[in-house]
Amino acid sequence: MDEKKLPNLATPVAVVLAGIIIAGAIVYGNYNDKPAIAEGTDGFVAEKFISVDNTDHIRGNKEAQIAIVEYSDLECPFCKVFHQSMNELMTTDGEKIAWVYRHFPIDSLHPKAFNEAIASECAMMLGGHDAFWKYADEIFAITPSNNGLDPAQLPQIAQKIGLDASKFNTCLKDQATQSRVNGDYENGIDIGVDGTPFVLIAVKGGETYPIFKIDIKSIENKEVQDLAEKIFKLYEKNIKAVSGNN
Protein backbone atom coordinates (compact mmCIF):
# COMPACT_ATOMS: atom_id res chain seq x y z
CA MET A 1 0.00 0.00 0.00
CA ASP A 2 2.92 2.33 0.63
CA GLU A 3 4.83 1.50 -2.55
CA LYS A 4 4.07 4.88 -4.11
CA LYS A 5 4.21 8.22 -2.41
CA LEU A 6 2.84 11.41 -3.86
CA PRO A 7 5.23 14.32 -4.36
CA ASN A 8 5.56 16.88 -1.61
CA LEU A 9 3.49 20.02 -1.79
CA ALA A 10 5.61 23.01 -0.90
CA THR A 11 2.81 25.43 -0.11
CA PRO A 12 1.26 24.90 3.35
CA VAL A 13 -2.45 25.11 4.08
CA ALA A 14 -3.67 28.60 4.90
CA VAL A 15 -7.04 29.17 6.52
CA VAL A 16 -8.49 32.63 6.78
CA LEU A 17 -11.91 32.91 8.36
CA ALA A 18 -12.22 36.65 7.86
CA GLY A 19 -13.95 37.39 4.59
CA ILE A 20 -14.41 34.77 1.94
CA ILE A 21 -11.54 32.23 2.04
CA ILE A 22 -11.83 28.49 2.72
CA ALA A 23 -8.17 27.37 2.75
CA GLY A 24 -7.86 27.75 -0.98
CA ALA A 25 -10.64 28.85 -3.28
CA ILE A 26 -14.30 28.46 -4.00
CA VAL A 27 -15.27 28.54 -7.64
CA TYR A 28 -18.37 27.99 -9.67
CA GLY A 29 -18.60 26.96 -13.31
CA ASN A 30 -19.65 24.25 -15.73
CA TYR A 31 -19.28 20.76 -14.32
CA ASN A 32 -20.47 18.63 -17.19
CA ASP A 33 -18.91 20.75 -19.93
CA LYS A 34 -15.49 22.27 -20.39
CA PRO A 35 -15.31 25.13 -17.88
CA ALA A 36 -15.26 28.67 -19.23
CA ILE A 37 -12.40 30.90 -18.17
CA ALA A 38 -13.55 34.10 -16.50
CA GLU A 39 -11.52 37.22 -15.83
CA GLY A 40 -9.67 37.44 -12.55
CA THR A 41 -9.17 33.70 -12.05
CA ASP A 42 -5.47 33.84 -11.16
CA GLY A 43 -4.37 30.61 -9.52
CA PHE A 44 -7.15 28.44 -10.95
CA VAL A 45 -6.59 26.83 -14.36
CA ALA A 46 -10.16 26.22 -15.48
CA GLU A 47 -9.38 24.50 -18.77
CA LYS A 48 -7.56 21.69 -16.94
CA PHE A 49 -10.41 20.95 -14.55
CA ILE A 50 -11.72 17.42 -15.17
CA SER A 51 -15.49 17.55 -15.42
CA VAL A 52 -17.63 15.66 -12.95
CA ASP A 53 -18.94 12.33 -14.22
CA ASN A 54 -20.38 9.10 -12.84
CA THR A 55 -16.94 7.84 -11.81
CA ASP A 56 -16.72 10.61 -9.22
CA HIS A 57 -17.72 10.11 -5.60
CA ILE A 58 -21.00 12.02 -5.43
CA ARG A 59 -23.24 12.49 -2.41
CA GLY A 60 -26.63 14.10 -2.90
CA ASN A 61 -28.44 14.69 -6.18
CA LYS A 62 -26.33 13.40 -9.09
CA GLU A 63 -28.54 15.33 -11.51
CA ALA A 64 -28.31 18.63 -9.62
CA GLN A 65 -27.56 21.87 -11.42
CA ILE A 66 -25.02 22.79 -8.75
CA ALA A 67 -22.06 20.67 -7.64
CA ILE A 68 -19.62 21.36 -4.82
CA VAL A 69 -16.31 19.78 -5.85
CA GLU A 70 -13.86 19.30 -2.98
CA TYR A 71 -10.17 18.36 -3.19
CA SER A 72 -9.40 16.97 0.25
CA ASP A 73 -6.84 15.30 2.52
CA LEU A 74 -8.16 12.79 5.08
CA GLU A 75 -5.60 13.90 7.69
CA CYS A 76 -6.14 17.63 7.18
CA PRO A 77 -7.79 19.13 10.30
CA PHE A 78 -9.58 21.80 8.27
CA CYS A 79 -10.87 19.13 5.87
CA LYS A 80 -12.28 17.31 8.89
CA VAL A 81 -14.21 20.44 9.87
CA PHE A 82 -15.26 21.08 6.28
CA HIS A 83 -16.49 17.49 5.99
CA GLN A 84 -18.65 17.98 9.06
CA SER A 85 -19.94 21.26 7.64
CA MET A 86 -20.82 19.65 4.31
CA ASN A 87 -22.64 16.79 6.01
CA GLU A 88 -24.71 19.38 7.85
CA LEU A 89 -25.40 21.18 4.59
CA MET A 90 -26.49 17.97 2.90
CA THR A 91 -29.19 17.40 5.52
CA THR A 92 -30.93 20.55 4.30
CA ASP A 93 -29.77 20.93 0.70
CA GLY A 94 -28.87 17.39 -0.36
CA GLU A 95 -31.77 17.11 -2.79
CA LYS A 96 -30.65 20.25 -4.62
CA ILE A 97 -26.87 19.85 -4.86
CA ALA A 98 -24.18 17.29 -5.61
CA TRP A 99 -21.16 17.02 -3.31
CA VAL A 100 -18.11 15.62 -5.13
CA TYR A 101 -15.07 14.34 -3.22
CA ARG A 102 -11.63 14.19 -4.87
CA HIS A 103 -8.36 13.16 -3.26
CA PHE A 104 -5.53 15.58 -2.56
CA PRO A 105 -3.34 13.99 0.16
CA ILE A 106 -0.50 16.36 1.03
CA ASP A 107 2.38 14.00 1.64
CA SER A 108 4.72 16.64 3.05
CA LEU A 109 2.25 17.37 5.85
CA HIS A 110 0.35 14.11 6.28
CA PRO A 111 2.28 11.03 5.05
CA LYS A 112 -0.53 8.72 6.21
CA ALA A 113 -3.18 10.46 4.12
CA PHE A 114 -2.20 8.74 0.86
CA ASN A 115 -2.72 5.25 2.29
CA GLU A 116 -5.98 6.36 3.88
CA ALA A 117 -7.14 7.62 0.48
CA ILE A 118 -6.27 4.22 -1.01
CA ALA A 119 -8.23 2.54 1.77
CA SER A 120 -11.28 4.67 0.95
CA GLU A 121 -10.97 3.64 -2.69
CA CYS A 122 -10.88 0.00 -1.60
CA ALA A 123 -14.15 0.63 0.20
CA MET A 124 -15.47 1.93 -3.11
CA MET A 125 -14.22 -1.12 -5.02
CA LEU A 126 -15.81 -3.54 -2.55
CA GLY A 127 -19.00 -1.69 -1.70
CA GLY A 128 -19.61 1.07 -4.22
CA HIS A 129 -19.90 4.82 -3.72
CA ASP A 130 -22.04 4.47 -0.60
CA ALA A 131 -19.25 2.46 1.04
CA PHE A 132 -16.73 5.09 0.01
CA TRP A 133 -18.71 7.82 1.75
CA LYS A 134 -19.26 5.70 4.86
CA TYR A 135 -15.53 5.00 5.00
CA ALA A 136 -14.59 8.65 4.57
CA ASP A 137 -17.15 9.64 7.23
CA GLU A 138 -15.60 7.15 9.67
CA ILE A 139 -12.04 8.33 9.05
CA PHE A 140 -12.94 11.96 9.57
CA ALA A 141 -14.95 11.04 12.67
CA ILE A 142 -12.14 9.18 14.44
CA THR A 143 -8.87 10.67 13.21
CA PRO A 144 -7.30 13.30 15.46
CA SER A 145 -5.94 14.71 12.16
CA ASN A 146 -2.37 15.76 11.36
CA ASN A 147 -1.22 12.19 10.71
CA GLY A 148 -2.81 10.91 13.92
CA LEU A 149 -4.80 7.89 12.74
CA ASP A 150 -3.33 4.47 13.57
CA PRO A 151 -3.02 2.52 10.27
CA ALA A 152 -4.25 -0.59 12.11
CA GLN A 153 -7.67 1.06 12.21
CA LEU A 154 -8.06 1.05 8.43
CA PRO A 155 -9.21 -2.61 8.14
CA GLN A 156 -11.22 -2.18 11.34
CA ILE A 157 -13.16 0.64 9.71
CA ALA A 158 -13.76 -1.58 6.68
CA GLN A 159 -15.23 -4.30 8.88
CA LYS A 160 -17.33 -1.76 10.77
CA ILE A 161 -19.07 -0.67 7.57
CA GLY A 162 -19.65 -4.27 6.49
CA LEU A 163 -16.77 -4.98 4.11
CA ASP A 164 -14.85 -8.25 3.86
CA ALA A 165 -11.56 -7.73 5.75
CA SER A 166 -9.57 -10.23 3.67
CA LYS A 167 -10.63 -8.68 0.35
CA PHE A 168 -10.02 -5.22 1.78
CA ASN A 169 -6.44 -6.05 2.78
CA THR A 170 -5.79 -7.52 -0.67
CA CYS A 171 -7.19 -4.40 -2.29
CA LEU A 172 -4.78 -2.17 -0.41
CA LYS A 173 -2.02 -3.46 -2.72
CA ASP A 174 -4.06 -2.89 -5.90
CA GLN A 175 -2.45 -0.50 -8.39
CA ALA A 176 -5.88 0.63 -9.59
CA THR A 177 -6.67 2.30 -6.29
CA GLN A 178 -3.29 4.05 -6.29
CA SER A 179 -3.92 5.27 -9.84
CA ARG A 180 -7.27 6.74 -8.83
CA VAL A 181 -5.77 8.69 -5.93
CA ASN A 182 -2.82 9.86 -8.04
CA GLY A 183 -5.19 10.92 -10.82
CA ASP A 184 -7.19 13.16 -8.50
CA TYR A 185 -4.01 14.61 -7.03
CA GLU A 186 -2.43 15.31 -10.41
CA ASN A 187 -5.57 17.05 -11.64
CA GLY A 188 -5.54 19.12 -8.47
CA ILE A 189 -1.96 20.21 -9.21
CA ASP A 190 -2.94 21.00 -12.81
CA ILE A 191 -5.79 23.30 -11.78
CA GLY A 192 -3.78 25.09 -9.11
CA VAL A 193 -4.73 23.41 -5.83
CA ASP A 194 -2.26 24.65 -3.20
CA GLY A 195 -3.96 23.63 0.03
CA THR A 196 -6.92 21.74 1.40
CA PRO A 197 -9.84 21.84 1.45
CA PHE A 198 -9.88 23.32 -2.06
CA VAL A 199 -13.48 23.75 -3.10
CA LEU A 200 -15.19 24.55 -6.39
CA ILE A 201 -18.85 25.42 -6.77
CA ALA A 202 -19.80 24.26 -10.26
CA VAL A 203 -22.98 25.28 -12.05
CA LYS A 204 -24.06 23.67 -15.30
CA GLY A 205 -23.80 26.20 -18.09
CA GLY A 206 -22.02 28.88 -16.04
CA GLU A 207 -18.63 30.54 -16.05
CA THR A 208 -15.89 29.81 -13.54
CA TYR A 209 -15.18 32.33 -10.78
CA PRO A 210 -12.67 31.98 -7.92
CA ILE A 211 -14.42 33.41 -4.89
CA PHE A 212 -11.00 33.34 -3.27
CA LYS A 213 -10.42 36.50 -5.31
CA ILE A 214 -13.96 37.88 -5.56
CA ASP A 215 -16.45 39.02 -2.96
CA ILE A 216 -19.28 36.50 -3.02
CA LYS A 217 -21.71 39.42 -2.95
CA SER A 218 -20.61 40.17 -6.51
CA ILE A 219 -21.89 36.84 -7.85
CA GLU A 220 -24.91 37.49 -10.03
CA ASN A 221 -26.30 33.99 -9.59
CA LYS A 222 -28.26 34.44 -6.36
CA GLU A 223 -28.60 30.69 -5.75
CA VAL A 224 -24.82 30.24 -5.90
CA GLN A 225 -24.22 33.29 -3.74
CA ASP A 226 -26.63 32.01 -1.10
CA LEU A 227 -25.04 28.55 -1.17
CA ALA A 228 -21.52 29.97 -0.80
CA GLU A 229 -22.62 32.09 2.15
CA LYS A 230 -24.25 29.07 3.78
CA ILE A 231 -21.04 27.04 3.39
CA PHE A 232 -18.93 29.82 4.90
CA LYS A 233 -21.25 30.19 7.87
CA LEU A 234 -21.31 26.46 8.63
CA TYR A 235 -17.55 26.17 8.25
CA GLU A 236 -16.83 29.19 10.42
CA LYS A 237 -19.27 27.97 13.08
CA ASN A 238 -17.57 24.58 13.23
CA ILE A 239 -14.05 26.03 13.20
CA LYS A 240 -14.99 28.19 16.18
CA ALA A 241 -16.50 25.18 17.94
CA VAL A 242 -13.36 23.04 17.67
CA SER A 243 -11.09 25.94 18.60
CA GLY A 244 -13.21 26.86 21.62
CA ASN A 245 -14.00 30.32 20.28
CA ASN A 246 -17.79 30.17 20.51
Image: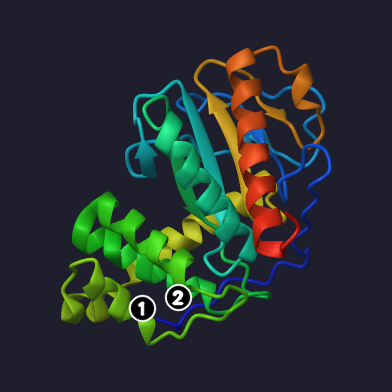
Labels 1 and 2 touching (C-beta < 8 A): yes
Q: CA distance from mark 1 to mark 2?
A: 9 Å
**In screen coordinates, is 99 left or right of 171?**
right
Task: In this rendered view, identify the residue nearer to me: 98 or 82.
Answer: 82
Identify the residue under disc 1: 154
Badge 1 element: helix
Q: Residue at x 27, y 51 (%)?
A: 130
Give amino acid for label 1.
Answer: Leu
| Residue 36 sits above or below residue 26 on the image | above
**Quarter in which the C terminus is drawn:** bottom right
Residue on which the image places disc 2: 115
Mark 2, secondary structure of its residue: helix
Mark 1 or mark 2: name the one nearer the start of the chain.
2
Tell which tag, 1 or 2, sits nearer the viewer: 1
Which residue is painted at 61% across and 75% down in the image?
110
Give residue 78's position: percent from left, percent from top: 64, 59
The residue at the point 69 percent across, 38 percent down is 45
* Residue 191 placement (x, y as % from top left): 65, 44
User: If the image is split into quadrants, where does the N terminus sit?
Assistant: bottom left
In the image, residue 191 sits, relative to residue 51, either above or below, namely: below
Q: Position of residue 46 (x, y in %)?
A: 65, 33
Q: Identify which residue, 230 or 157, lies in the foreground.
A: 230
Q: Position of residue 204 (x, y in %)?
A: 49, 19
Kind of residue sitting beneath label 2: Asn
